[in-house]
Image (spheres, grey):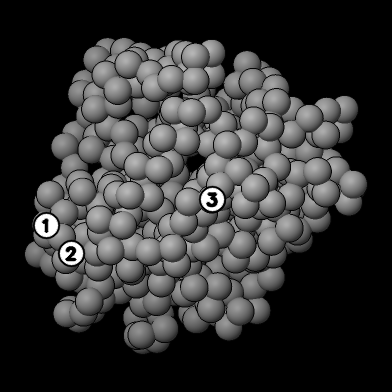
């Protein structure tokens, strides 16, 4: 892949950075902290550790290059979304703890913006919030319930508001819009510019990044790097941080920790002012709608529409290949949906098509943890909401590793343990059946305008929010 990194996505092509790999690890190594994975989780953890303790010897081990995975190719939402609902978080902790988690997530959006500014990372950030339009009566009813539920948790219009048709269309003039919800707690950004800037920032603080260095297993105080079937290096460390997210199943013994589910994206050519006047997004709001199978989009700094969604089949055995970046049927369906939402886009060129995997734990609950006895730390399970959550994870891991009791280490996702996924073939059958059911449910609601019995029946089985 070394010669093809810029071609992975629109973001990689326009990052304005060299994708020439950094040197690989050659030989055994001893460090204070070894971090596996040079995505957002690993880089944020290294950033905050190096900031707090410049004396620490920190190494990051990356199978490809920094930003190769989801951190460099996502939809560019830096949002306060946490994959588990307030109710689910409270059920495992308390109402007060769930509220603290929510507040921490909202503050994290601003922390990402702050660090980018402080480090001179030009990541095309615009905090325009998120608008989720309701385009059927069933979606509008769910939007009303969502806002009512937010009120029951003490969240007001400053956190989540319900927009009528006129107010919704002022932000996003999608077809058939009946209303929308809006939250200000999200920023659109260029994910590859952010992740590459973070890589430079940690290197400036003395952290070493080893690229094209494939880790095959981790153990207490040790990381194993494979060169061939007969040769491997051992990295010895006081602390080992697993920051592998959707790629976690590639590590020995962790095949059922999360499942790698594909999300695919398309991008248009830059659109004219006339087209944008019919669409909206004047503040570069990120957007979605109320369907069951998630779609997401943003207006880029150079006036493209970037639009993505779930629905590509899950691969048997949690297999991950470079082919996961493409699925002709899903990309075609995304383009059709984009034109359905915004007819003015019809006839405009789709310049980029890409995708990648995200990590989903069995209970859809992100977690962060640290075992001082074995020196093993981890964070992940973001379910596609990781651009901000990884920053919170990095700051929390800093405090856990340094033995600092803080508001962050008291958050309820610390120490949470998700159940493992079922073995194959049950995993493959269940996940793909769930994806198919959500597709059927959306078609049913689109045709009837009414809530789907299929969706209500299947949501608990696939671990929905």
Assess disc 3: are there few (<14), some (14-19) or many (≥20) residues with their C-alpha within 10 Å of its C-alpha.
Answer: many
Residue 163, label in figure:
3
Residue at left offset 40%, top offset 43%:
144
Badge 2 marks a residue whose secondary structure is helix
Residue that numbered label 1 is attached to: 93
Q: Label 2 neighbourhood size at 10 Å, few (<14), some (14-19), many (20+)?
A: some
Residue 339 visible, this angle: yes
Q: CA distance from mark 2 to mark 3?
A: 29 Å
Considering depth in this image, is 444 or 202 the residue closer to the camera? 444
Cβ atoms under marks 1 and 3 closer than 8 Å:
no
**Vertical arrangement, residue 337 with respect to residue 218, above or below:** above
Q: Are marks 1 and 2 in contact (CB under 8 Å)?
A: yes
For the residues carrying marks 2 and 3, which lies nearer the camera in this image?
Answer: 3
- Residue 312 image point, x, y percent: 51, 22
Cα separation, mark 1 vs mark 3, equals: 32 Å
Q: Is residue 429 above or below residue 405?
A: above
Whether residue 240 sits left or right of residue 96 in the image: it is right
Q: Position of residue 410 (x, y in %)?
A: 17, 70
Residue drawn at the location 22% of the way across and 76% of the way down: 407
Secondary structure, mark 1, is loop
Q: Secondary structure at mark 3?
A: strand
| Residue, disc 2 | 97
Q: Measure how far apart labels 1 and 2 are at the Cα level.
A: 6 Å
């Amino acid at each position: 892949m070394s010669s093809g990194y810029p071609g992975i996505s629109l973001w990689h092509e326009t990052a304005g950075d060299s994708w020439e790999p950094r040197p690989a690890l050659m030989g055994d190594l001893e460090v204070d902290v070894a971090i596996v994975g040079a995505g957002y989780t690993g880089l944020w953890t290294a950033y905050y550790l190096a900031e707090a303790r410049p004396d620490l010897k920190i190494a990051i081990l990356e199978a490809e290059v920094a930003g190769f995975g989801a951190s460099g190719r996502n939809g560019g939402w830096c949002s306060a979304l946490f994959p588990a609902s307030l109710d689910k978080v409270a059920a495992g902790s308390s109402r007060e703890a769930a509220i603290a988690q929510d507040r921490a997530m909202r503050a994290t959006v601003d922390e990402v913006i702050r660090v980018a500014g402080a480090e001179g990372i030009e990541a095309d950030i615009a905090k325009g919030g998120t608008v989720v339009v309701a385009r059927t009566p069933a979606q509008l009813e769910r939007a009303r319930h969502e806002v009512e539920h937010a009120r029951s948790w003490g969240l007001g219009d400053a956190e989540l508001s319900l927009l009528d048709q006129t107010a919704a269309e002022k932000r996003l003039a999608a077809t058939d819009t009946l209303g929308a919800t809006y939250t200000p707690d999200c920023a659109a950004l260029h994910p590859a510019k952010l992740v590459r800037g973070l890589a430079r920032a940690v290197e400036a603080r003395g952290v070493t990044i080893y690229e094209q260095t494939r880790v095959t297993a981790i153990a207490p105080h040790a990381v194993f790097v494979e060169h061939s079937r007969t040769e491997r290096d051992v990295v010895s460390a006081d602390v080992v941080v697993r920051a592998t997210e959707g790629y976690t199943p590639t590590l020995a013994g962790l095949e059922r920790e999360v499942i790698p589910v594909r999300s695919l994206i398309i991008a248009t050519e830059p659109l004219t002012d006339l087209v944008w006047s019919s669409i909206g997004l004047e503040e570069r709001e990120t957007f979605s709608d109320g369907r069951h199978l998630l779609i997401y989009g943003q207006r880029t700094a150079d006036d493209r529409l970037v639009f993505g969604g779930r629905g590509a089949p899950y691969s048997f055995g949690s297999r991950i290949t470079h082919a996961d970046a493409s699925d002709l049927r899903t990309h075609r369906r995304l383009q059709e949906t984009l034109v359905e939402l915004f007819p003015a886009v019809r006839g405009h060129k789709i310049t980029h098509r890409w995708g990648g995997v995200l990590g989903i734990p069995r209970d859809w609950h992100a977690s962060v943890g640290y075992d001082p006895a074995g020196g093993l730390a981890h964070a992940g399970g973001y379910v596609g909401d990781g651009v901000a959550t990884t920053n919170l994870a990095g700051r929390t891991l800093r405090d856990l590793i340094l033995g600092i009791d803080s508001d962050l280490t008291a958050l309820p996702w610390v120490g949470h343990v998700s159940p493992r996924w079922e073995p194959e073939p049950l995993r493959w059958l269940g996940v793909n059946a769930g994806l198919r059911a959500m597709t059927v449910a959306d078609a049913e609601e689109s045709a009837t305008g009414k809530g789907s019995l299929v969706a209500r029946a299947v949501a608990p089985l696939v671990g929905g929010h």
